[in-house]
Image: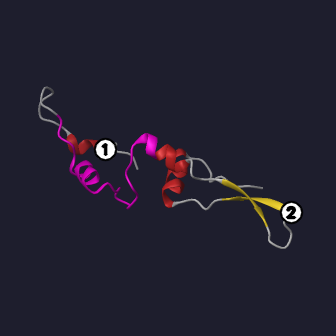
């Protein structure tokens, strides 16, 4: 989801003064801008902006326009993964 290297053991270096080379997984992620499970890779501010698109909408039915109810927008796979990684349940309206 983020550009962090998920295979840090793959970038071990022979000398502590030599520059560290990124692992093959990190190079592939940077090149394709996709994670191994197909989600988009983005920086922190873009991830937060994408999470902010989860909206709570007030909906009125056409036949009874005076009655409204709250409806949460459907989550994207990226939003579901972010909530799962944080160990949080998906938001819902009761």
Inspect the magenta stretch and tell me whether residue 26 lies in it. yes
The residue most toward the top is 17
The residue most toward the bottom is 63
In the foreground, 66 or 4: 66
In terms of sequence position, does the residue under pointer 2 or pointer 1 come before the other? 1
Q: Position of residue 93 (x, y in %)?
A: 73, 55
Q: Position of residue 88 (x, y in %)?
A: 60, 47
The residue that appears at 64% across and 59% down in the rendered structure is: 73
In three-dimensional space, the C-alpha distance between marks 2 and 1, rounded to whole angstroms, equals 50 Å
Callout 2 environment at 10 Å: few (<14), some (14 to 19), or many (20+)? few
Pair 2/1: label in front:
2
Question: Does 1 sit left or right of 61 as displayed?
Answer: left
In the foreground, 40 or 23: 40
Instruction: Say which quarter of the image contains residue 65.
Output: bottom right
The residue that appears at 22% across and 50% down in the rendered structure is: 27
Q: Is residue 76 visible?
A: yes
Inspect the magenta stretch and tell me whether residue 19 lies in it. no
The residue that appears at 34% across and 42% down in the rendered structure is: 4
Q: Position of residue 18 (x, y in %)?
A: 12, 30
Q: Is residue 85 visible?
A: no
Asked if labels 1 and 2 touch by Cβ distance under 8 angstroms, the answer is no
Q: Secondary structure at mark 2?
A: loop
Quarter the C terminus occupies: bottom right
Callout 1 environment at 10 Å: few (<14), some (14 to 19), or many (20+)? some
Instruction: Say which quarter of the image contains residue 35.
Output: bottom left
Question: Does 11 sit left or right of 70 as displayed?
Answer: left
Magenta segment: 20-46
Check disc 1 and report the residue beneath it.
5
Check disc 2 and report the residue beneath it.
67
Question: Does 93 sit left or right of 89 as displayed?
Answer: right
């Amino acid at each position: 989801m983020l550009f962090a290297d998920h295979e840090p053991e793959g970038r071990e270096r022979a000398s502590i003064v030599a520059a560290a080379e990124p692992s093959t997984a990190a190079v592939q992620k940077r090149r394709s801008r996709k994670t191994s499970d197909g989600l988009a890779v983005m920086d922190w501010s873009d991830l937060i902006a994408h999470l902010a698109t989860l909206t709570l909408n007030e909906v009125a039915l056409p036949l009874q326009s005076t009655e409204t109810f709250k409806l949460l927008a459907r989550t994207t796979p990226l939003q579901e993964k972010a909530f799962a990684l944080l160990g949080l349940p998906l938001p819902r309206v009761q």
